[in-house]
Amino acid sequence: MNGFEKRREEKEKQILEATFNLLNTNDSNKDNITMERIAKEANVGKTTIFKYFDNKENLIRKVFKNYIEEMIEEAREIVYQNKPFDETLVALSQNKIGYLNKITQQFYLEMMAYMTEKKDDELTFLINQYVKENQEMMLDLFYRGRKEGKVALKYSDEFLIYFFQAMVEGLSNPDVYEKMKPYVSEWTDILIKGVAPDR
């Protein structure tokens, strides 16, 4: 990477971080954040933002996309470390909670609304890929859990996927999430013991 490309990448990162920080406050939303405010927060000129992102919509979309991609990548790294089933499940739960802790409820609601309101093929594809890859990772994890004697054979893969999906989706609900935050260890413990073979 030459000097020009490196400076461009650094500027783009500055702009994305500034936009994330502005979106991630309780008093801001994507509608009341102006390009002037983003430029000031990023310490760049407004024209620089337009040069890299064309418009505010593209910039906000990129912030949401980056957040999702980072979460996916970290989950992937956790699963493929090949640690024991229970350690992996705890790490995945803590990772999900950690990513939810990085953002305000306002940011989360804005991101979810954006993804459901916009007909964005790339984001839809990204989410569909995430769901597919997540299922494959979970199947690998269940197989590992069965091999280690930590997942009962009586539970089908389909049931386990729905069970964990229901837990995660419940946790993704802002009201449930706020109440569950202090109980991440207990929540994970029940998940692990709940699928363990009878002793």
Image (spheres, rainbow, N blue to C red):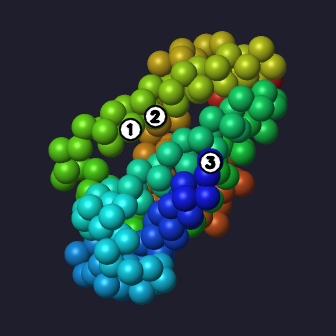
Question: Type of residue at label 3?
Answer: Met
The answer to whether residue 34 shows anywhere in this view is yes
The residue lying at 59 percent from left, 20 percent from top is 139
Distance Cα–Cα, label 3 vs label 2:
29 Å
The residue lying at 52 percent from left, 31 percent from top is 134
Query: Tag count in the figure?
Result: 3
Distance Cα–Cα, label 1 vs label 3:
30 Å
Most foreground residue, 85 or 129? 129
SS at mark 3 in the image: loop
Badge 2, how many Cα within 10 Å: few under 14, some, many 20+?
some
Q: Identify the mark at residue 130; answer none if there is no mark.
A: 2
Q: Identify the mark at residue 140; answer none if there is no mark.
A: none
User: Quick check: 179 above or below 141?
Assistant: below
Q: Label 1 belongs to which residue?
A: 127
The answer to whether residue 196 shows anywhere in this view is no
User: Quick check: 164 above or below 8?
Assistant: above
Marks 3 and 2 close (CB-CB < 8 Å): no
Image quadrant of residue 162? top left
Q: Quadrant of the C terminus?
A: top right
The residue lying at 31 percent from left, 84 percent from top is 36
* 83 relative position to 29: left or right: right
Question: Type of residue at label 1?
Answer: Ile
SS at mark 2 in the image: helix
Image quadrant of residue 4? bottom right
Question: Type of residue at label 2?
Answer: Tyr
Residue 188 pos. (x, y %) = 67, 46
> In the rendered structure, which disc, 1 or 3, sits on the residue that comes first in sequence?
3
The residue lying at 63 percent from left, 35 percent from top is 76
Q: Identify the mark at residue 1; answer none if there is no mark.
A: 3
Badge 3, how many Cα within 10 Å: few under 14, some, many 20+?
few
> In the rendered structure, which disc, 3 or 2, sits on the residue that comes first in sequence?
3
